[in-house]
Amino acid sequence: MEQMNHSIELFIDHSGWFAPILFVLLHIIRPILFIPVIVVCIAGGVLFGFVEGAILSVIGLSAMSLLSYKIVYRFPKLHDRIAKLKQRVFQDRTMTVSQVMVLRITPFVHFHLLSFYLMEMTKNLREYMYYSVLGVIAPAIVYTAFGKAITGFPWYMTASLFLILALIYYLIDKKNKLDIQVD
């Protein structure tokens, strides 16, 4: 295992400017390969370090979000299938952009389904990309910096982290409902 890590580090060192491009491309093709976002972001932290790995993950996830937007609106049947899946998963649930951003941090909610939710919440590509880029910053930072540590935590620590995220989601939802009632 240590030899493999050394080989990967040597490859990155000798790849120069090409390695970050490959990493961003990996983010773009990640959905086709069925690789979870968290795995690629963790790899970015291991291979490039925290700062560069997080920046490259934000770039890659943003490019993937743009491509997803273009594909979903270019193929109406795909749009309809994802809309049906969204309906089954969220069941007419109304969420705020903040809630979508919190859910993007949790690895159990499908990243592209949340992107689709965001697509339907926004008016155009520009607004979608604005919120999408804001929404990928937190997961890129969290997964790059703490992803490796989170996967090494005992089950009760991981469960505690997800309970905290669920509590944050609940509090945002409660605040949103109170704001709606006040208006």
Image: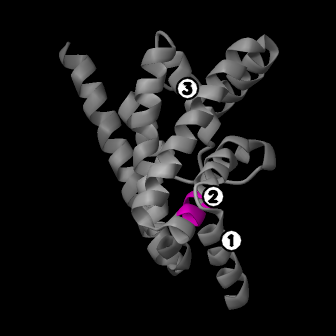
Residue at image x 63%, y 61%?
Answer: 39
State the image quarter where residue 115 is shown: top right
Q: Circle 2 sits in a helix, a strand or a loop, which is it?
A: helix
State the image quarter where residue 90 is shown: top right
Given contact means CB atoms under 8 Å apart, are the residues at marks 2 and 3 in contact?
no
First-in-chain label (2 vs 1) = 1
Query: Principal SS element in the magenta part?
Result: helix
Residue toward you, 120 or 60: 60
Identified by mark 1, the residue type is: Phe
Q: Residues within 10 Å of mark 2 (few under 14, many from 20)?
A: some
Which residues lie in the magenta part? 39-44
Q: Is residue 67 above or below residue 33?
A: above
Residue toward you, 21 or 170: 21
Q: Is residue 118 magenta?
A: no
Q: Which residue ends up furthest to the left in the rendered image?
A: 182
Tell me the mark number nearer the camera, choosing from 3 and 1: 1
Q: Circle 3 sits in a helix, a strand or a loop, which is it?
A: helix
Identified by mark 2, the residue type is: Ala
Q: Is residue 123 above or below residue 69?
A: above
* Residue at mark 2 to residue at mark 3: CA–CA distance: 32 Å
For residue 15, side relative to residue 81 (left or right)? left
Mark 1, residue position: 11
First-in-chain label (3 vs 1) = 1
**Which mark identifies residue 19?**
2
Q: Circle 1 sits in a helix, a strand or a loop, which is it?
A: helix
Q: Residues within 10 Å of mark 3 (few under 14, many from 20)?
A: many
Mark 3, residue position: 117
Residue 73: image location, x then y, percent: 68, 14
For the C terminus, which image quadrant? top left
